[in-house]
Image: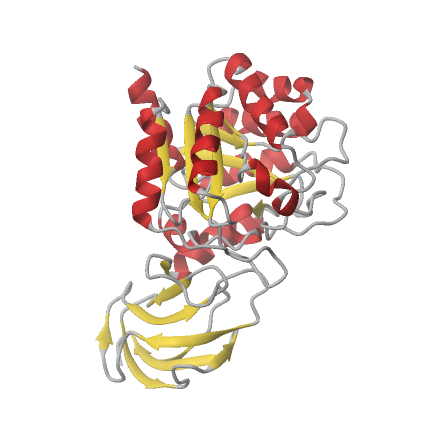
């Protein structure tokens, strides 16, 4: 099943965050817990982990982009095709 | 300061974060983790733990380092202790940490609600209980009320060195906070006494060592020190990112003065690894 992963709200009242760095590549199969991307909040650099096993299909944002909370980050394939 | 040092990197599994905070939301409970934008939310959620913040989400003080909103709080919710105990039970944590906003609008500063929460957790679970209290304006009757509920740990934070109080926490008083720690050490009925402070607000090394001596001089048992992290442009700026090595130096210094347990690292917060600190202190006390 194809899913679109969105920018999570990492902090109360957070409206958007800058996508600092991708930690994976398009086409990469990753397991739950793999760090997928880094963003920076006021207090720390935050790496967000995959919530389940997946294949990263396509990035929908580039490093340096400011992405709104709930805005699309990447497409992935999860579960059995 | 722009750009964060490498040691201020954290990770999140949002499914675990949602599980913990979904439970808090379902029981209409606040957590200081979320209200203060704590960077350890990801790590603590992995352990299924959170620090609950009672007495509402609005604080009557306006400390310039803190992300908890200052405002006019609502009346205490008499059902909050029951819901809090239910959350502790559902999370299954072995050590529960409860703090509050400062409630200078209440006669006892909210001490009776702290006591009700400790008793409710005790009645519902086998968890050890730690409370992190405000200064209650030094009111000894309020401190006695908390002590009478028999928490395992009573914390009160000095937060920073005295020279920075007027800038960082203008409605607080360093000597009053030391007095609270001293009173609890002498009248705590066996509870371990704990405090915490931040580094990186502009304090000098000499001031920091003086603070550690001052705190130990009150009889305080447990100490936590962490990096000040600026919540927004409207708060005090970070003056310095203190290295992990420097934190380790302060930890060794504090332990040499006789603290039972010390956690000093950049991402340490008041309740960071609180259960582990309690276990370490208990082992030393045996």
> Residue at position x 33%, y 45% from top?
B246
Nearer-the-camera pick, B85 or B9? B9
> Residue at position x 77%, y 47% from top?
B72
Question: What number of labels is visible?
Answer: 0
Based on the displayed image, in which of its 4 quarters is residue B249 positioned?
Answer: top left
Nearer-the-camera pick, B236 or A36? B236
Residue B257 seen in the figure: yes
* A26 is higher (above) or lower (below) than B128: below
* B204 is higher (above) or lower (below) than B38: above
The image quadrant where one finds the C terminus of chain B is top left
Based on the displayed image, in which of its 4 quarters is residue B113 positioned?
Answer: top right
Residue B116 seen in the figure: no
Q: Is residue B262 left or right of residue B61?
A: left
Q: Is residue B10 left or right of residue B96?
A: left
* Residue B111 place in picture, x, y as percent: 65, 27
> Residue at position x 50%, y 25% from top?
B122
* B115 is higher (above) or lower (below) than B148: below
Residue situated furthest left in the rendering = A29
* Residue B285 place in picture, x, y as percent: 33, 17
* Residue B94 place in picture, x, y as percent: 39, 33
Nearer-the-camera pick, A65 or B63? B63
Nearer-the-camera pick, B74 or B200? B200
Say how the picture is coloured: secondary structure
> Residue at position x 60%, y 32% from top?
B174
Based on the displayed image, in which of its 4 quarters is residue B259 positioned?
Answer: top left
């Amino acid at each position: 099943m194809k899913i679109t992963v969105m920018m999570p709200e990492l902090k109360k009242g957070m409206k958007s965050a800058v996508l600092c760095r991708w930690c994976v590549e398009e086409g990469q199969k990753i397991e739950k817990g793999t760090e997928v991307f880094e963003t920076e909040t006021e207090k720390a650099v935050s790496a967000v982990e995959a919530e389940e096993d997946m294949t990263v299909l396509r990035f929908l944002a580039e490093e340096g982009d400011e992405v709104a909370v709930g805005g699309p980050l990447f497409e992935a394939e999860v579960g059995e095709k | 300061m722009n750009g964060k040092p490498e040691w201020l990197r954290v990770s999140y599994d949002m499914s675990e974060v949602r599980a913990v905070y979904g439970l808090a939301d379902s029981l209409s409970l606040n957590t200081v983790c979320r209200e203060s934008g704590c960077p350890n939310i990801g790590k603590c959620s992995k352990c299924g733990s959170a620090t609950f913040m009672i007495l509402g989400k609005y604080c009557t003080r306006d400390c310039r380092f803190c992300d908890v909103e200052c405002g006019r709080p609502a009346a205490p919710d008499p059902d909050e202790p029951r819901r809090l105990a239910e959350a502790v039970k559902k999370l299954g944590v072995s050590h529960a940490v409860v703090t509050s906003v400062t409630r200078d609008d209440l006669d006892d500063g909210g001490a009776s609600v702290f006591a009700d929460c400790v008793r409710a957790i005790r009645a519902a679970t086998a968890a050890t209980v730690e409370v992190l209290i405000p200064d209650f304006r030094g009111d000894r009757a309020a401190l006695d009320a908390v002590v009478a509920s028999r928490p395992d740990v009573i914390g009160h934070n000095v937060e920073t060195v005295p020279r920075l109080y007027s800038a960082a926490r203008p409605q607080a008083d360093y000597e009053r906070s030391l007095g609270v720690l001293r009173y609890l050490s002498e009248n705590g009925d066996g509870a371990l006494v704990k405090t915490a402070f931040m580094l990186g607000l502009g304090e000098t090394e000499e001031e920091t060592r003086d603070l550690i001596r001052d705190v130990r001089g009150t009889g305080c048992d447990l100490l936590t020190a962490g990096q000040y992290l600026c919540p927004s442009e409207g708060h005090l700026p970070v003056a310095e990112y203190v290295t992990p090595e420097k934190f380790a130096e302060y930890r060794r210094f504090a332990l040499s003065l006789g603290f039972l347990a010390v956690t000093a690292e950049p991402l340490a917060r008041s309740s960071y690894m609180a259960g582990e600190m309690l276990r370490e202190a208990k082992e030393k006390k045996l």
